[in-house]
């Protein structure tokens, strides 16, 4: 009996390996790895089967190969960590008759319209929303809301493709600029714009219950960071605060409202908090959050959310700490995106106060630039510690300024860097 792993994580040249599947799943039986092209291990030994696929997100050959290998190698479990594999893994389980997250549950955590519909039916607060597949539906919803609205992919992640439209004129300009055939569904969600602070809760769930969680917020909203090419920043909140208790209670209610994932699996939830303290759901996913969230969890609690999710999906025991505050310190993280041009020099160590981890990804001359790295691209990451969320934010501000003063990109005469400097906002 074997375990099938669907992988989009970069397993190449990682020392120590960030996703050591073979270590995490020791004793689970033969391991089969189906991986995105260019992400597989440097020495692909120790696998019962190893294969890479081009255009991984959309390649139906992954499912075809999984179905064949599932029968040939008597696969008993399917494991995945990436957003694009949540539904794919569930469908493979269904085809092979295996335990694990069902298609119904996967779609509830992946499709934002389904998520909000189920949360709304359970009596939880959500912004007004509507699935939209044509221009008329967007315009009708804009008239209903009467103010700013947000359009996004129902299955999107990382703020990719999210647009904030200030008024009906903005909606009309946006619709007019779309090149979509009249009979081609858009697969979008329109929702009322919420002018409120965005918070997140991260942890492990199983059987419709939250087993472990911690809370944080973003120094800079993810959409703003993506649009302006700024560092993506996460700060941890004091676990004993009333705010954190409210966030965890709300998230537990959201998890209970959705079709359960029976095995321990990581989750990442986001919620708006209005000025009067009321919470409403932004979204929730049945996978680990990005932007250094797993690094924070490892340092604060000794819990690797990806490891927990891999072992839980494989039917293996998962060790979690008892409820309570983390060990002494709060942590924050930032991921630094590239500037325009070819990277020619990058600092390899960071001597600033509070920096507990600093890693760079590309080597100089790698050709990484703002135009090719994509929305999730980065050239360096750092984790800082601070006594308060504000101190975390200030130290991340210092790291961001320090990094871009030292990193160098070779730019053509036609490329201009419009990056702006801002002070860390008050938390």
Image (cartoon, grey):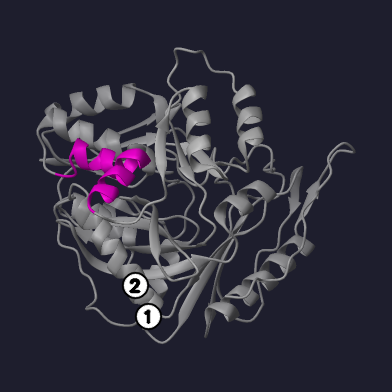
Is 53 situated above or below 337?
A: above
Q: Which residue is pictured at 30% across the width and 62% down the height?
A: 251
Inspect the magenta stretch and tell me whether residue 113 lies in it: yes
Q: Residues in magenta?
A: 100-122
Kindly indicate whether the residue at mark 2 contacts the one at mark 1 (C-beta within 8 angstroms): yes
Give percent across and percent down for residue 54. 45, 26
Q: Which residue is pictured at 58% across the width and 46% down the height?
A: 377
* Quadrant that contains the C terminus: bottom right
- Lateral position of residue 101 relative to residue 402, left or right: left
Nearer to me, 132 or 66: 132
Give percent across and percent down for residue 125. 34, 56
Residue 8 seen:
no
Is 198 situated above or below 95?
A: below
Q: Which residue is mark 2?
A: 246
Inspect the magenta stretch and tell me whether residue 49 lies in it: no
- Lateral position of residue 426 relative to residue 159, left or right: right
Residue 230 seen:
yes
Q: Which residue is mark 1?
A: 242
């Amino acid at each position: 009996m074997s375990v099938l792993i669907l992988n989009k994580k970069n397993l190449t040249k990682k020392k120590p390996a960030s996703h050591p599947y073979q270590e995490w799943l020791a004793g689970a039986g033969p391991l089969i790895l189906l991986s995105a092209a260019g992400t597989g291990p440097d020495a692909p030994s120790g696998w019962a089967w190893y294969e890479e696929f081009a255009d991984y997100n959309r390649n139906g050959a992954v499912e075809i190969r999984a179905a064949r290998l599932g029968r040939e190698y008597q696969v008993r479990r399917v494991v995945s960590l990436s957003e694009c594999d949540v539904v794919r893994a569930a469908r493979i389980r269904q085809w092979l008759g295996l335990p694990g997250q069902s298609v119904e549950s996967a779609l509830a955590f992946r499709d934002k319209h389904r998520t909000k519909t189920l949360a709304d039916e359970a009596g939880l607060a959500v912004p007004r929303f509507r699935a939209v597949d044509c221009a008329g539906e967007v315009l009708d919803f804009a008239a209903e809301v009467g103010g700013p609205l947000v359009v996004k992919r129902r299955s999107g992640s990382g703020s990719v493709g999210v647009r904030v439209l200030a008024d009906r004129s903005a909606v009309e300009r946006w619709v007019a600029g779309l090149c979509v055939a009249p009979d081609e569904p858009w697969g979008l969600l329109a929702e009322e714009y919420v002018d409120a602070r965005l918070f997140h809760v991260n942890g492990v769930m199983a059987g419709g219950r939250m087993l472990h969680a911690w809370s944080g917020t973003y120094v800079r909203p993810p959409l703003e960071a993506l649009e302006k090419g700024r560092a993506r920043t996460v700060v941890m909140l004091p676990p004993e605060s009333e705010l954190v208790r409210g966030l965890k209670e709300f998230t537990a209610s959201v998890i209970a409202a959705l079709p359960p994932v029976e095995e321990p699996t990581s989750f990442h939830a986001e919620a708006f908090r209005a000025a009067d303290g009321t919470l409403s759901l932004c979204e929730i996913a049945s996978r680990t959050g990005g932007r250094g969230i797993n690094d924070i969890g490892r340092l604060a609690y000794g819990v690797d959310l990806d490891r927990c999710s891999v072992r839980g999906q494989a039917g293996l025991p998962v060790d979690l700490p008892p409820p309570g505050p983390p060990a002494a310190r709060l942590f924050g993280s930032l991921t630094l995106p590239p500037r325009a041009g070819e990277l020619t020099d990058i600092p390899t160590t960071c001597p600033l106060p509070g920096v507990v981890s600093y890693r760079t990804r590309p080597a100089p001359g790698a050709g990484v630039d703002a135009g090719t790295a994509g929305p999730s691209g980065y050239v360096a990451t750092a984790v800082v510690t601070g006594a308060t969320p504000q101190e975390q934010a200030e130290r991340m501000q210092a790291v961001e300024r320090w990094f871009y003063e030292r990193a160098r990109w070779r730019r053509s005469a036609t490329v201009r860097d419009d990056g702006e400097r801002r002070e860390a906002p008050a938390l």
